[in-house]
Amino acid sequence: MAYIETPDGVPLYYEERGEGETLLLVHGWTMNAEYWWQKNVETLADDHYVVTVDLRGHGLSGKTDENHTLEEYARDIRHFVQSLEFDDVTAVGWSMGAAVLLTYLDQFGSDRLRAVGFVDQSPRLLSEENWEHPVFGGFTPEALEEVVETIQSARPDFAKQFISDMFADPPSAETVDEMYAETMKTPTSVATAVLRDLVNSDRRDVVPEIDVPTLLLYGEQSEIYPSDVGAWMHDRISDSELVMFSESGHVPFWEEPDAFNEAVSSFVEQSSDRDA
């Protein structure tokens, strides 16, 4: 088992496989790398050096009650790629993982990044006037506090419903239970702390400043982000490609893994060829 320790002493668990251009996969809120990328890593590693990492407080990484913000997670990713001496990384983030990468770009620009990919994420989750792309199609600060209270008092019910809602075709109850068990590797205190930060963040101003090739991967049937936020992102990132998955909700890498893997692999190769 491989770990990199952050400057404040939190061990980050990671796995690596394959050879070729470096591809870093960053998971979403309360998820982890080992379970959620299981339909992707082996195939992508046929042609690329694939690295997956558990964010602090998630999966097999160290648990701490402190520093669960997008800014800290982005600093962790920065420390991670520096420690492993990665340059020209293609980093793909799903959901909160995409928000972490947007925060990385906000703090560090595209240093050490060759390209980025965002999987079904909005740069702004709260509802406000003239903003059409909040999470769930509409979300208020009051709704956030209700969700936090529900997670604290009835996490199993909330998490299992959330997991089902992530899919265009919900998994079996047995699979949902299995996925729920994986989310429980993230302590409730961590889940609520970083959720508050995620929901209150606003990275819309970062989007048009992205200066590396960007792959946008969105599920046409997403109930987590039911608007056309992928098109909004595509319109504002000068060098971007938008791929829509017709049979997917929030997790196209799980629901349509072959198409997802092909899109990511082709993108990595194209980005590499442009730099050659």
Image (cartoon, rainbow, N blue to C red):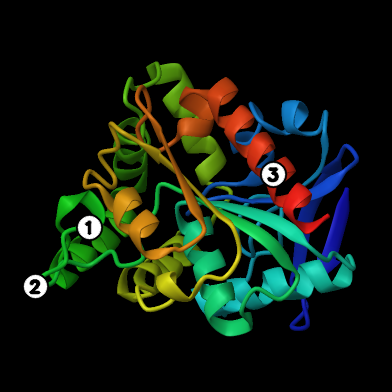
Q: In this view, does 39 lie to the left or right of 186?
A: right
Badge 2: few (under 14), some or many (20 or more) residues near its Cα, within 10 Å? few
Residue type, label 2: Glu
- Along the horizontal axis of the image, is 92 left or right of 135? right
Q: In the drawing, does residue 225 fall left or right of residue 272?
A: left
Amino acid type of the residue tagged 1 in the rendering: His
Element at label 1? loop
* Residue contact at pointers 2 and 3, CB within 8 angstroms: no
Q: In this view, does 222 lie above or below 60?
A: above
Of labels 2 and 3, earlier in sequence is 2
Helix, strand or loop status at disc 3: helix
Name the residue carrying label 1: 133
Q: Distance between the residues labelled 3 and 1?
A: 29 Å
The amino acid type found where label 3 is placed reads Gln
Q: Is residue 23 visible?
A: no
Dots 1, 2 in contact, CB < 8 A? no
Q: Residues within 10 Å of mark 3 (few under 14, many from 20)?
A: few
Residue drawn at (39%, 74%) of the image: 203
Q: Badge 1: how crowded within 10 Å, few (<14), some, or many (20+)?
A: many
Q: Which residue is at a point 74% across and 26% down the rendered structure image? A: 43
Q: Percent x, y for residue 124?
A: 30, 67
Tell me, for residue 229, which label it has, or none.
none
Residue at the disc numbered 3: 270
Count every numbered label the image shows and give the total: 3
From the image, tell me which residue sits under label 2.
Answer: 129
Cα separation, mark 1 vs mark 2, equals 11 Å
Quadrant of the rendered image containing residue 208: bottom left
